[in-house]
Every structure is written in C-alpha cells, then in structure tokens.
Amino acid sequence: MNTSTTSSSSLANSVLPLTGRVLVALIFLVSAFGKIAAPAGTIGYIGSVGIPLPSLAYVLALVTELGGGLMLLLGYRTRAVAAALAVFSVVSALFFHHALGDQNQMFHFLKNLAMAGGLLQFVAFGGGSYSVDNRRAEASGALSLAR
C-alpha cells in the first residue's frame, strides 16, 4: 500500500474540507457582523436597489449569513446549507452587483459566482470528516450496528 496516497487521501477527507468550510463561512460571518454593526445603512442600501420591504430583506439576509455561516462552519446539514448559501450568493450578485461596467462591481459579481461554485462542492461532497454531519452519521451507524 502506498502510504503517500493514503495520507493524501486522509488529508483530503479530513483537514481540507474543514479548512474550506472555515474559509467560505468567514465571508458570510464577516458580512453578517457588518450588517449587525450598521443596520440602518444596510437597510438603506437594500432599499436603494429596489428590493421591497428592505427591513424584512435585512433580517432574512442577516439570518442567512449568520445562521448559514455558523452551520457551514460547524458542518451541520452542510449540503442543504451550502445549497441555500449558493442561491443566496447568486441572488446577491444579481441584485447588488449587476453594474458590470464598473470594474469593482464586476469583481464582486464574479466573487459571488465563485463562492456559489465553491459551495456547490460542499453540496456534492459534504462537509468532510471533521463535521457535525459526519459525527451524526457515525453515531447513527454505531446505534444501528448495536441493534
């Protein structure tokens, strides 16, 4: 058996998914804390792009970013949360970064699409070994074996 392949596979199934979840979750958590720090400015910005009920949209965005970011970080219901955050990222790009003639807006638009692409990897492959999902699967497997 090739130990190099085994250790690479072990790393890919454990540390890399955890690292990816942490890095992707950070952008949502930082954004959520920014919204918490400046709710009036955020609500005003949401309203300025024509989204109806900007206060409600603010709460929904905050819950999505903070709740989704924490769930992704922990690897809890990773596939569903990653799918929701991917949709949120694309919708955010379309509503808030659609002025593609502005280089800064183009960058943010593409960043959101790249985030959605990364999140789709979690939809496809799950949260990895160091995740709540994996712990729950191991516990339910252990219980079914004991029965």
Image (cartoon, rainbow, N blue to C red):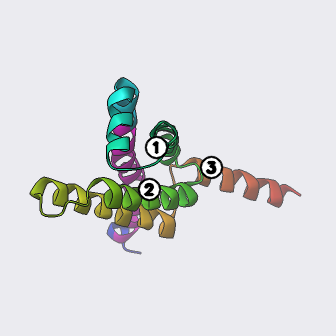
Residue 54: say if magenta: no
Tally the numbered discs: 3
Does label 3 or label 2 sit earlier along the sequence?
2
Q: Amino acid at mark 2?
A: Phe
Question: Which mark is nearer the camera, 3 or 2?
Answer: 2
Quadrant of res 114: bottom left
| Mark 3, other Cα within 10 Å: few <14 / some 14–19 / many ≥20 | some
- Placement of 94 over or under 28, stated as above or below: below
Residue occupying the point 40% across, 36% down = 32
**Contact, mark 1 vs mark 2 (Cβ under 8 Å):** yes
Q: Is residue 7 visible?
A: no
Disc 3 designates what residue? 135
Task: In the displayed orientation, state which residue is furthest to the top.
Answer: 37
The answer to whether residue 122 is left or right of residue 139 is left
Q: Position of residue 112 (x, y in %)?
A: 30, 58
Q: Is residue 18 visible?
A: yes
Q: Position of residue 1 (x, y in %)?
A: 41, 75
Q: Secondary structure at mark 2?
A: helix
Of 133 and 1, which appears nearest the observer? Answer: 133
Measure the C-alpha gap from mark 3 to mark 2. 27 Å
- Placement of 130 over or under 118, stated as above or below: above
Disc 2 designates what residue? 88
Residue stretch rendered in magenta on the structure: 5-31
Disc 1 designates what residue? 61
| Mark 1, other Cα within 10 Å: few <14 / some 14–19 / many ≥20 | some
